[in-house]
Image (spheres, grey):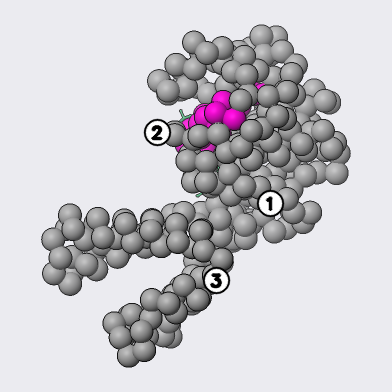
């Protein structure tokens, strides 16, 4: 499932001497762990807490990753990475607290959960971050914000852990994190929905399902790759497809009409932003 290749030679990861404790090795936590190991983090520096370890994660014990250690066996936890569901953080976080000392940095990727809640439940020097699932192929983007008591060294380690699965943007204003979550955290789902609906509409227009699915998948991923490699703005790339009076213009008249994709996207992002704020409560 996780196929991360090393994003870059990451000397900060290689030089970590304390324990990196991952709480919650599901879809995102598992992808991050794979990225750390691919980036050169010594597996003997890693411990994982998760009540139901997947076979993939369990197999890492052979490389030296500690699985569900007690506080003593975990050693000095340099960084606790919290990747459980926000809804279970109050309960799970209380069990994590004994692993946290005043030297521990706590890096959370939970949607909604604020720095203040993390400080209250776990203590430590908190970094709140929001990655996304392209992390699983080393192509994620993470936005991070650090609490005032996070040292430069703790921030460097957090940056290295997050950068192991893609790029990282640091912000100073935690208030941005709800909208960040709505745009890039949840964003891959909107793109996958586009692929689903493009295929469905192709079938509706008479294509065999398998062909429509292939066309939608290749079109969405090819356009994404073109966007990545090109210096041109998305709007210019769009205009490059659109011949005056042609087929694309006919479709865009629908998509860019009123109400169109712009209105739908504004409503979708507002709903996700609102939900992120609710998760904080
Ligand atoms: N998926 C995404 O696209 C993104 C998710 N996130 C955030 O990442 C976090 C995890 O999401 P995701 O990976 O999708 O969810 P998953 O359900 O895949 O992963 C959560 C993991 O935590 C485990 N867990 C449950 N209770 C505990 C506990 N007490 N201690 C340790 N581990 C526990 C779960 O085990 P079990 O399955 O047995 O309950 C599961 O393996 C969430 O907070 C989410 O907001 C952030 C960015 C993107
Ligand atoms: O849906 C969620 O709540 C999580 C956070 C961002 C992506 N998945």
Q: Is residue 71 visible?
A: yes
Circles 1 and 3: CB atoms closer than 8 Å = no
To which quarter of the image does residue 257 belong? bottom left
Q: Position of residue 9 (x, y in %)?
A: 64, 33
Pointer 1: what residue?
Answer: 169
Q: Which mark is residue 1?
A: 2
| Callout 1 secondary element | strand
Within 10 Å of disc 1 (Cα), the crowding (few <14, some 14-19, many 20+) is: some
SS majority, magenta:
helix
Badge 1 or badge 3: first in the primary sequence: 1
The CA distance from mark 2 to mark 1 is 26 Å
Q: Position of residue 127 (x, y in %)?
A: 73, 41
> In the rendered structure, does residue 87 fall within the stretch colored magenta?
no
Residue placed at 33% from the left, 61% from the top? 219
Residue placed at 26% from the left, 60% from the top? 215
Magenta stretch, residue numbers: 20-39
Within 10 Å of disc 2 (Cα), the crowding (few <14, some 14-19, many 20+) is: few
> Which tag is nearer the camera, tag 1 or tag 3?
3
| Callout 2 secondary element | loop
The CA distance from mark 2 to mark 3 is 32 Å
Q: Which mark is residue 233?
A: 3
Q: Along the horizontal axis of the image, is 239 left or right of 273?
A: left
Residue lying farthest to the bottom in this orientation: 245
Q: Is residue 97 visible?
A: no
Circles 2 and 3: CB atoms closer than 8 Å = no
To which quarter of the image does residue 39 belong? top right
Residue placed at 41% from the left, 62% from the top? 223
Quarter of the N terminus within the rendering: top left
């Amino acid at each position: 499932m996780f196929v991360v290749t090393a994003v870059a030679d990451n000397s900060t990861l290689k030089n970590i001497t304390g324990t990196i404790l991952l709480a919650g090795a599901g879809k995102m936590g598992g992808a991050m762990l794979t990225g750390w190991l691919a980036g050169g983090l010594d597996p003997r520096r890693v411990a994982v807490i998760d009540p139901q370890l997947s076979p993939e994660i369990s197999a890492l014990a052979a490389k030296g990753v500690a699985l569900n250690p007690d506080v003593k066996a975990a050693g000095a936890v340099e960084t606790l990475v919290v990747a459980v569901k926000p809804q279970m953080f109050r309960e799970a976080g209380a069990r994590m607290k004994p692993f946290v000392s005043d030297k521990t940095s706590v890096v959370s990727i939970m949607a909604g959960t604020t720095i203040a809640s993390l400080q209250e439940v776990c203590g430590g020097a908190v970094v709140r971050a929001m990655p996304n699932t392209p992390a699983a192929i080393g192509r994620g983007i993470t936005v991070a914000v650090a609490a005032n008591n996070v040292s430069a060294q703790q921030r460097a380690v957090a940056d290295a852990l997050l950068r192991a699965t893609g790029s990282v943007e640091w912000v100073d204003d935690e208030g941005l994190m709800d909208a960040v979550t709505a745009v890039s955290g949840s964003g891959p789902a909107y793109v996958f929905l586009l692929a689903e609906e493009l295929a469905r509409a192709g079938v509706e227009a008479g294509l065999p399902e398998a062909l429509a699915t292939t066309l939608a998948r290749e079109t969405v991923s090819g356009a994404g790759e073109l966007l990545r490699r090109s210096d041109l703005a998305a709007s210019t790339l769009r205009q490059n497809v659109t011949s005056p009076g042609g087929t694309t213009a006919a479709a865009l008249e629908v998509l860019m009409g009123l109400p169109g994709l712009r209105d739908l996207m504004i409503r979708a992002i507002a709903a996700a932003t609102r939900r992120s704020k609710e998760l904080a409560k």
